Amino acid sequence: SNKKKVTVVFVLGGPGSGKGTQCANVVQHFGFTHLSAGDLLRAEIKSGSENGTMIQNMIKEGKIVPSEVTVKLLQRAMQESDNDKFLIDGFPRNEENRAAFEKVTEIEPEFVLFFECSEEEMERRLLNRNQGREDDNIDTIRKRFKVFLESSLPVVEYYGAKGRVRKIDAGKPIEEVFETVKAIFTPISE
Ligand code: UP5
Ligand code: MG
């Protein structure tokens, strides 16, 4: 087969729960490649792709881009990488994403890292981020929270029922959260 055997970890959690921050730590310590679905979509907007305007509008509204677009970007990034270990951050965000990824790639995640954090704390982090993200305003943040609860949490529950979720208390300081994350990755990295 021309399919390489890869290890995939899905990293899920609400907006501002610290997915990107902790993925950067896992890259440093455990040699994974970090693929943020949101970053790939934002790069697609910048590249002037034909889907750019549609993606931009959906992100501004906190809506989930059709899986056809996102799965293609993730698959391409995995194929272009020499690595065989990937953190897929912020995906799958709904049942459609999950089913499409599984069908197209035939990959099942090793586990799902789930960052649990209060909305109050996530809102505070997002409003303080100051990186010019078009979705970091209070109106869009509220929409992102709603979509997370309605569409993304059910995906976490789906994997939870299969015993595949590793839940992290993400409300603590960055270093403390990483201690918990480290303990989860150490056994699969020895
Ligand atoms: N910070 C981090 N950890 C902290 C801690 N422990 N204590 C204190 N501060 C902490 O962190 C956010 C901020 O908090 C930073 O300033 C950080 O320093 C600080 P970050 O690590 O960036 O959190 P993260 O969970 O990555 O937040 P992000 O905003 O990226 O999460 P979202 O899930 O909202 O964003 P994403 O980029 O994944 O998606 C954006 C949009 O793209 C979606 O709303 C959707 O419209 C679209 N999208 C799709 O349609 N499909 C996809 O598959 C993916 C995205
Ligand atoms: Mg992020």
Image (cartoon, rainbow, N blue to C red):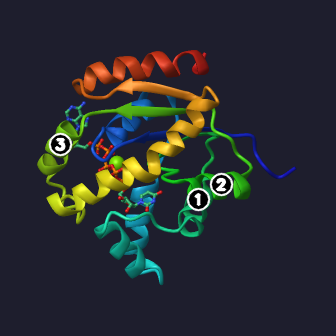
Q: Which residue is mark 2?
A: 99
| Residue 174 seen in the figure | yes
In percent of width and height, residue 156 lies at 51, 39
Query: Is there any visible trace of residue 79 in the rendered image?
Result: no
Q: Secondary structure at mark 2?
A: helix
Name the element at disc 3: helix
Q: Is the CB of mark 3 within 8 Å of ligand 1?
A: yes
Of the residues shown, which amino acid type is indicated by label 2?
Ala
The quadrant where residue 146 appears: bottom left
Residue at the far right: name it: 1
Q: Residues within 10 Å of mark 1 (few under 14, many from 20)?
A: some
Q: Which residue is mark 3?
A: 125
Residues at marks 1 and 3, CA–CA distance in whole angstroms = 29 Å
Query: Dot 2: within a 10 Å radius of its alpha carbon, few (fewer than 14), some, or many (20 or more) residues?
Result: few
Sequence-wise, the earlier of marks 3 and 2 is 2
Given the image, on which type of amino acid does mark 3 rest?
A: Arg
Residue 51 percent coordinates (x, y): 47, 79
Would residue 141 appear left or right of 3 to someone viewing this image? left
Give the labeled residue for mark 1: 96
Three-letter residue code for mark 1: Glu
Of the pair 2 and 112, the residue shown nearer to us: 112
Quadrant the C terminus occupies:
top right
Tell me what residue is drawn at x 70 percent, y 45 percent: 107
Whether residues under marks 2 and 1 lie with C-beta atoms below 8 angstroms apart, the answer is yes
- In the image, 128: left or right of 70? left
